[in-house]
Image (spheres, coloured by chain):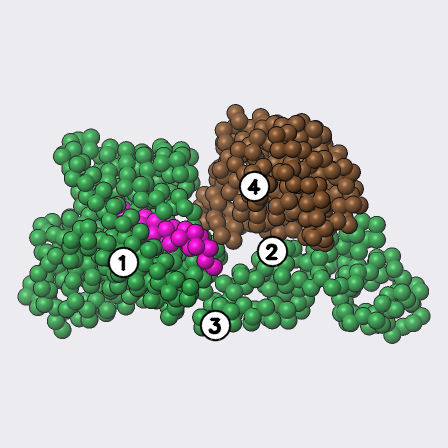
Amino acid sequence: MNYKLLQIFRNTPFGRETFLQSLYFCKTIHAHPVVYIPESDKFLMYFPNDAIQIDLDSSYLTSPKTAKQHASELFDEMGFKPAFFAPRSFTASTLPDIPTNFDYFCCPRSVSDLSSKIGLGHIGPKVRRIIKQAPFPVLLTSPVFKPWKSIAVFFGGSTNARKALQMGLKIAMVSKLPMDIYTLREKKSKGYYENIIKESDLAGPVSQFLREWHYYEKSEFDAMLYDVPHDALIVLGAYGHGVIKDLLFGSKMEKIQSTVTNNLLITGPQCELSLLH
Amino acid sequence: MDDRLLLIIAGSIAGICSGLAAVALRLALESVTEWLHPFRQFWWAFLLPAMGALLSTIYLEKITREGAGHGVPEVIYAVSKHGGLLRLRSSYSRLISSFLTIGSGGSAGPEAPVVMSGSAIGSNIAKLLRLNDRQRTTLVGCGTAGAIAGIFNAPLAGLVFSIEVVLGKWEFSNIIPIAIAAVAGAEVSRAIIHEQVLFNHLPFNMGTADILPGICLALFAGLISVFFTKTLNTSGKFAKKNRFSFWMRAIIGGSFVGCIGLFFPVVLGEGYHFIQSMISGTFTMGIFLTFVAVFAKIFATAITLGWGGSGGIFAPCLLIGSLTGIVFHKIVFLLFDNAACASEGAYALLGMTGLISGVMQAPLTGIFLVLEITGGYETILPLIVVSAISSTMSHYIEPASFYFKELIRRGQFLRPGTDARILSDLNISELVSTEFTNVSEHMIFREFIEIIKTSDQFFFPVIDENTGAYKGMIEIRNIRRYVLNPGIYDMVFLNQIMDTGVLTASLENDLQDVLEMMETNNMESIPVVEHDTFIGMISKTRILDLYRRELIMQTSVR
């Protein structure tokens, strides 16, 4: 396993919590965190079909002289060898290009909107675009460092939900943590969802790692969110089709992030996943 | 749909849209210039460019959050490295910022912003239609051509600039859609503005007697081009080094330009009015002041673009070139009062070509642009001579043009079909051979001999059996003396014979760096190690295989 997670480092107490969460994520799934300490408040990410400019708020440029030292201390604290990313390509002199060949990306939450909205998150259009174009899953961390003890996969049967399930299984395999599936039914039987898993050749791993499969009626959406353990990593697919599209597209995504305090791992439509690698 | 037809249709849409953007900017600039004209007589008029630059930089830095500058290198970079991917916001951001800069009197031209805008329009049309990199690059070219054709009413110049400067490759499949986009852009411009040529003039009557002075003017223009390019770069670097905030820089730079403008109004704005008077032969400034005006315009443009303003260098090149031509003509007549040379206007024309060709090192663009904006087709032979000499001389002194200089310095100037471009399109992860048997550092040599017997590997990575960390490498050819000595089979551990000094690459390295490392150290293969973990080996043979495949793909006829 040589997965890499890119973290945009913010040299503030809040940034510290985010970074600790990323480090914990990496430790649990045996990935390597790589930190980018921004020198300007914007950078570009070139995806196969889109060039997205990320605009950070000024807090990302706080105390640049101590940023590397603070990041290194947190690396040490979690037992990682410090690894920093220095951009070599620039679209314009103030627009560094950040590569998109990482395996995971910890989304700098304040790119989503004003920092006042960070508390319980507000996924803005920019984060949506990253999720929509990214070939990697995006980690949206909880506001404070909170180790997670299980994996909760939101599965509604769509292609992206299958990707999320695959991602959940992959993490369960590596971390050995139990996995729960949460399904919001839309007048379909349990067999319908089980068949989807069988057809996707995921039945074997699911039976091996699944702790419990929770079913909810559509009207019980809020109840489902409250039932998810507070210390679970929620894995979900965005921009899916069918049920999951209704569930997660648009305001539902905001709803989930603003209701739960869990860490979220989001797989978008371009996300490339394999259980083997 | 057929690929070519699709590109022609999408290209013409890109051409129309970018033509509209160009016309909108041109009309907006004309209106604001007219509106601000009465205020230019007041003593505080020097503050106008400062206000414009301030608004422009605030707009770019705080609203669209893009860096200042003119944008053409960004387009070339996007084409070189990212298949022409450009942000949607670029399709309007530079139009607005350059409107604020130039409209208020900043010394810059509207062409580069419309190029940026047109290219971004082309790129985003391609994104909308989910086209591939090659098709997207063509549409970026279409947008560029439409924009230049629209702003100057010059379709040929649009086509040539797009291919010569932005795409860098004359390819049959590109030329047709780009030509059609250029025509579309020019037609949109003609339909709205109803003009035949940008600068009207009387016949120039150039003859054989003008060839020698033309050559001298070309050399002079070449020197001025180099000076202009260097001043532009120096100004930008100086602005970045000082400690002023971005808005303070804009105010200082803008005020300075405004002050120059109080004495030399010729430096303000895009200066088309003065170019027209020079071509028509009605420019009345004396030889000394015209000579000073050349440098005043150079400094004003360098400060405008370097200190936070937004705009392009096409129009300043045209103006500086015209002034250079006029100065040269005046000097010729000062020295030889009965010289049989053509008019001042003709020399202004030659100067323009010299400057455009010298600064951009794009001779064809210089020739066609000046021909089309003046309609002076009878001057084509001297124009070719001047353009060729000026661009050659400029290239001799300064190998990189203004547009390419920064990209070349950063090693990011990658033209299609070149080694650097092909290598940049390959990434290390697709070159790494991962089918390798690892051996443990505490393995005794006898066990290793058994592994060698059944393996065809030449390299064996040695790893720590507990952590899996990479420790070193055993190359078969380096351990022959141990293999032929069975007496030491049970006495030697692999950590005693492994080579710990082998250079390693990482997945983050550029392929060019890796190749250089292999060349410098005479290596046939190089281990790739990431976070202390052995990933695999990269061999020159594998690089050559994939290089050939990529080359065939990039150069095949489509």
Residue indicated by mark 3: B556
CA separation, marks 1 and 3?
A: 29 Å
* Disc 2: CA contacts within 10 A as few (<14), some (14-19) or many (>=20): few
Dot in front, 3 or 2 = 3
Residue indicated by mark 1: B184
At label 2, which amino acid type do we have?
Asn
**Place of residue B297 in the rendered image (x, y in percent of width and height, measured from the top left):** 24, 47
Q: Which mark is residue A245?
A: 4
Q: Marks 3 and 2: CB-CB under 8 Å?
A: no
Q: Which mark is residue B509?
A: 2
CA separation, marks 1 and 2?
A: 44 Å
At label 1, which amino acid type do we have?
Ala
At label 4, which amino acid type do we have?
Lys
**Place of residue B87 in the rendered image (x, y in percent of width and height, measured from the top left):** 43, 47
- Residue at (57%, 30%) from the top-left corner? A255
- Residue at (82%, 63%) from the top-left corner? B497
- Residue at (61%, 46%) from the top-left corner? A158
The span shown in magenta is B107-133
CA separation, marks 3 and 4?
A: 42 Å
**Residue A65, relative to residue A200: is it above or below?**
above
